[in-house]
Image (spheres, rainbow, N blue to C red):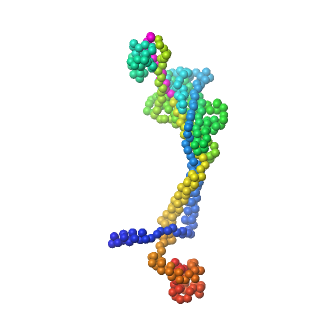
Amino acid sequence: MFFRSFINWVVEGATTFETQATVKIKDPRLGLFNTLMTTLALLYIILFELMYRRGYMEIDPPEGGSVRVSVRLPHFEKLEASKNLPYCTQEYYPGLGCRYVAEFSGATEHSILVPTRVNLTLFNDLKPGCTGSQHGLYSSDRNCVYNIYESRPDQQEKAISFYASYPEHYTVLIDHLISSPSKNQVYTSRSIRGWILDSNGNRMVTFPKNGPDRDYVFTVQQLLDAGGVDLDDLADGKNLPKRYDGLVLLALINYENPWYRPWEVTYGISVQEATGTEYKHVQPVFDNLLSTDPTPMNHFTVENTHGIRVMFIQTGSIGAFSIINLLLNIVAGMAMLDVAAWIVEFVMLNIVTEKDIYEGYKFTSTREWGETRKQAFDLSQVDEYSEYTKPPSELKTLEDFENAADLEKAPSGKGNKQIFYNRYIY
């Protein structure tokens, strides 16, 4: 029995064809619900996909970026004496005191270093028997090369450590550029507007278009504020302030032409702290690296500078109008209209009280193929009565047809009446 049912199901599926039919459901509840869902789908397509996500544009990331950064010392003479700073007192752990740092590694391409703590260690008796021409970083004798990471404690003659005064007041000048493949244009920091943004996306510092150099200068404190960083907060997992070990900041320069001003390219600099990191720069120093004096050079100083390392990273997306992208996103967005219709149909067939009646309108089947062919043949014999192809809605049975007011219009004979009735009902 099961096998026969399965065979019938397979045969019926292979010999039938399902087609779409349009049925108007005159239900104000479903009509209003369908209008609401269709409106929401259209708003999603237009406002979100096309406008907010710039679906009408060909969007590319910026290319060929370059960043040039320079750091300048603050005017210490105009600031309060460092002895009055909280972190310069002996009560500030670990009580190192402060000094003004006038020389440091400063800036490199795409990054800057601002010192917060410096440790100076003086070593002696490094490589006994090595002369000045052999000793140190650049040596003609492999046995005289000194590795600063292999020094012994007994070689340390003196070591001092101190905080750098006013690292937050160091000033930064930034100059950068990118190219846009989609617009085939090069943008510089002077040719477009930009901002430094806080963690909430609010504008803190504004960089105007085509301004003088002073308009593109900002302080390290403004970068710290943008990232929500306080140097006196404790570092992660340590009982020491961030000022002690240093930290790394990522300054993301994001270029875009936003959806509300697609004709203008702008940039925003947002700052993030690389949590759990510290930064130091170790540099060995000899009295004279070029000395050929045969007398031994037994003194060697290591500068260990901890500080704020700011790395500038260029990113973003710049778009230009594209008719192909517009059409593709419109077609893709139309799927939302199908989803809206499916939701309304689900409510119609499963939730409303009249669901069984609506299901009868939704799913219908024709007669068997043999009966349909016979009916088509019978109707072909009365083509001259084609004006009766659309029946009045009140005709439901053959008796209703025989009692209709337009009965005299029908062909004579009961057989022809049956054919005429079939054309009305089916």
**Residue 142 lies in the magenta-colored region:** no
Q: Nearer the viewer, residue 136 or 358?
A: 136
Q: Is residue 241 visible?
A: no
Residue beneath the point at 56% across and 33% down: 67
Q: With respect to residue 297, does 246 lie above or below? A: below
Question: Where does the image place residue 130, in percent across and percent down from the top left?
Answer: 41, 14
Q: With respect to residue 409, does 58 lie above or below? A: above
Q: Quadrant of the N terminus?
A: bottom left
Count of number-bearing discs: 0
Q: Residue pushed farthest front?
A: 140
Q: Residue pushed farthest bottom?
A: 413
Question: Where does the image place residue 149, in percent across and percent down from the top left?
Answer: 41, 23
Q: Nearer the viewer, residue 269 or 390?
A: 390
Residue beneath the point at 56% across and 81% down: 383
Residue beneath the point at 52% across and 33% down: 311
Q: Nearer the viewer, residue 145 or 285?
A: 145
- 317 vs 16, left or right, is right
Span shown in magenta: 294-307
Q: With respect to residue 283, does 350 lie above or below? A: below
Q: With respect to residue 165, does 297 lie above or below? A: above
Q: Quadrant of residue 296?
A: top left
Question: Where does the image place residue 143, in percent across and percent down from the top left?
Answer: 39, 18
Residue beneath the point at 36% across and 69% down: 6
Question: Where does the image place residue 344, in percent across and percent down from the top left?
Answer: 52, 63
Q: Is residue 330 visible?
A: yes
